[in-house]
């Protein structure tokens, strides 16, 4: 019988842990290494560092079988490994470019512990075009004996919330290698998945990742701009997106109007690509517009709320959903976090509920009241904002919610609830680009609200 391959995965975040657990499930022996000792101790105890459906079961199954191990030691992880996967953060630097300092520090550390026979280093982190070449040079600078160690690009396309399915049944696998043999060996690892594979040089593979994320972000900003036009033209942007998506040339995904894109990837990747373009003499006009439309969506939510309530200061607003999308507790660059922050700056008391992200969110939102369930959040509230389309929000007793609110206004930032259903339950419903005409100031005439009744900064708005 063929001996199982040994793989080392550096970084046990969303990408690293899923990669490690899935490769182990495919029959490889995997050691996941992380510098966060607390995280490694928890993983050894079977506790996941974040919420991802089915991940705990997958980790447990493979840990018990002895195929998956966790360590804080690079030396232990690398010993005997034929492949070292880098799954490390590449946050935006001060100028918007992807910061590769963590990748570089990992390479320096690896240079101290890699011995013959040399493994292949595979970078899964999203990093600037030319990063694999730069990491390879750095490795050789650290130790000339490692000059021949290949650094292959293998960008990751998994989505949080469906990460295991995306890894195991990917639309495609992209392998970028500057030597055929290294590329072929990485390709072999993925053969059991039976997925289409694109084999390219490292620079092209790195660009595929940025171009893909920027394109998906562009689809979102496109439909959001269409939604803004729909609002003026009395058309339903959700149906427009659906109608467009039925055209196979266009495709239906990422055409749902909403408050915009967030998360740990799209915002930073569009920014990094735009920065890379400018730095290299290309004016990124489309990318700039994609980012501009996205950031204006938050302001539009605030504006709509003000237009419909007539005041913000002193209002009590419920927020349903904090995570940047359903089925994850990731709040990095979540638009709900930005909207809650903007509301609180305007003097709004926010009562929030999210099925899994509240613990993480509470650390950054000390003023927000975190509620046990969606009903508690809306009690006596002046409006509710639906910002993450968790399934459970689609099955709520809306009449019960509306009955306990001070003003039954639903601002559906994801067009997740049918307007007719909400209106039937007694709500004043406002979606994104759903053609509803603006009803100014739902407040009952003569009723005194705490704080100022108008927001001077918002007077004269035309939204
Ligand atoms: P993450 O922040 O969830 O995890 C990173 C992990 O690396 C953490 O556990 C951290 O402790 C560890 N770490 C930091 N420095 C280390 C070091 N020097 N040595 C060992 N471990 C170290 O990150 P992520 O979301 O998994 O993203 C990793 C990369 O993959 C990024 O470049 C990201 O853009 C890209 N990516 C992410 C996703 C996603 O959905 N999260 C999807 C595709 C690609």
Image: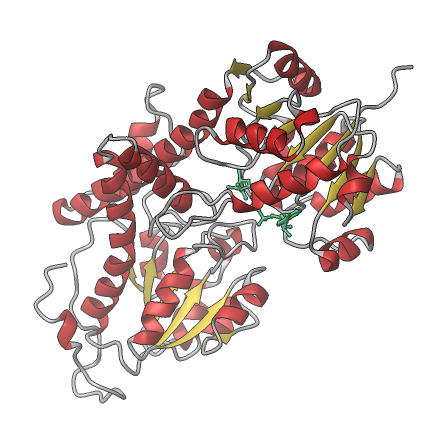
Judging depth in this view, the residue of 350 and 434 nearest the camera is 350
Judging depth in this view, the residue of 191 and 219 nearest the camera is 191
Judging depth in this view, the residue of 104 and 77 nearest the camera is 104
Q: Is residue 55 above or below residue 429?
A: above
Residue 202: x and y in percent read 51, 21
Residue 61: x and y in percent read 82, 40
Residue at the location (33% across, 24% down)? 250
Judging depth in this view, the residue of 112 and 221 nearest the camera is 112
Question: Which residue of the protein is positioned furthest toward the left in this rendering?
Answer: 460
Image quadrant in which you'd find residue 211: top left
Q: Is residue 136 above or below residue 87?
A: above
Residue 267: x and y in percent read 39, 46
Question: Which residue of the protein is positioned furthest toward the top in this rendering?
Answer: 180
In the rendered image, which quarter contains the N terminus? top right
Residue 273: x and y in percent read 36, 36
Asked if residue 359 lies left or right of residue 219, the reply is right
């Amino acid at each position: 019988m063929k001996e199982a391959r040994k793989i080392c995965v550096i970084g046990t975040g969303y990408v690293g842990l899923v990669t490690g657990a899935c490769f182990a499930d495919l029959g490889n022996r995997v050691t996941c290494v992380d510098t966060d000792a607390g995280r490694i101790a928890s993983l050894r105890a079977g506790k996941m560092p974040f919420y991802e459906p089915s991940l705990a079961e997958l980790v447990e199954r493979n840990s018990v079988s002895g195929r998956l191990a966790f360590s804080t030691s690079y030396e232990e992880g690398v010993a005997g490994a034929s492949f070292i996967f880098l799954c490390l953060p590449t946050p935006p630097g001060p100028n918007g470019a992807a910061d590769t300092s963590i990748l570089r520090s990992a390479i320096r550390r690896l240079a101290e512990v890699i011995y013959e026979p040399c493994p292949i280093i595979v970078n899964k982190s999203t990093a600037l075009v030319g990063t694999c070449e730069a990491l390879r040079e750095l490795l050789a600078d650290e130790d000339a004996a490692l000059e021949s160690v290949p650094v292959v690009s293998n960008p990751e396309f998994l989505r949080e919330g469906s990460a295991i399915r995306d890894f195991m049944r990917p639309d495609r696998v992209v392998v970028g290698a500057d030597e055929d043999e290294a590329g072929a060996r990485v390709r072999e690892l993925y053969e059991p998945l039976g997925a289409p594979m694109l084999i390219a040089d490292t620079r092209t593979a790195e660009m595929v990742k940025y171009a893909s994320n920027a394109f998906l972000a562009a689809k979102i900003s496109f439909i959001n701009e269409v939604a803004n036009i729909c609002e003026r033209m009395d058309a339903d942007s959700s149906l427009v997106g659906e109608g467009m998506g039925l055209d196979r040339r266009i495709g239906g995904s990422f055409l749902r109007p909403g408050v915009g894109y967030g998360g740990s990837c799209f915002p930073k990747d569009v920014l990094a690509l735009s920065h890379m373009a400018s730095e290299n003499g290309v004016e990124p006009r489309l990318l700039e517009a994609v980012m501009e439309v996205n950031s204006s969506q938050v302001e539009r939510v605030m504006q709509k709320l003000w237009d419909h309530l007539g005041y913000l200061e002193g209002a009590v607003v419920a927020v349903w959903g904090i995570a940047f999308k359903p089925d994850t507790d990731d709040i990095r660059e979540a638009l709900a976090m930005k909207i809650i922050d903007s509301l609180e700056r305007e003097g709004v008391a926010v009562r929030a509920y999210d099925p899994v992200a509240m613990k993480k969110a509470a650390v950054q939102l000390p003023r927000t009241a975190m509620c046990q369930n969606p009903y508690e959040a809306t009690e006596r509230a002046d409006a509710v904002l639906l910002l993450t389309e968790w399934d459970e929000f689609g099955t709520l007793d809306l009449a019960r919610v509306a009955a306990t609110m001070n003003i039954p206004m639903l601002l559906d930032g994801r067009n997740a609830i049918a307007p007719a259903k909400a209106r039937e339950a007694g709500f004043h419903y406002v979606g994104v680009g759903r053609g509803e005409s603006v009803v100014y100031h739902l407040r009952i005439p003569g009723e005194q609200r705490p704080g100022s009744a108008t927001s001077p900064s918002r007077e004269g708005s035309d939204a």
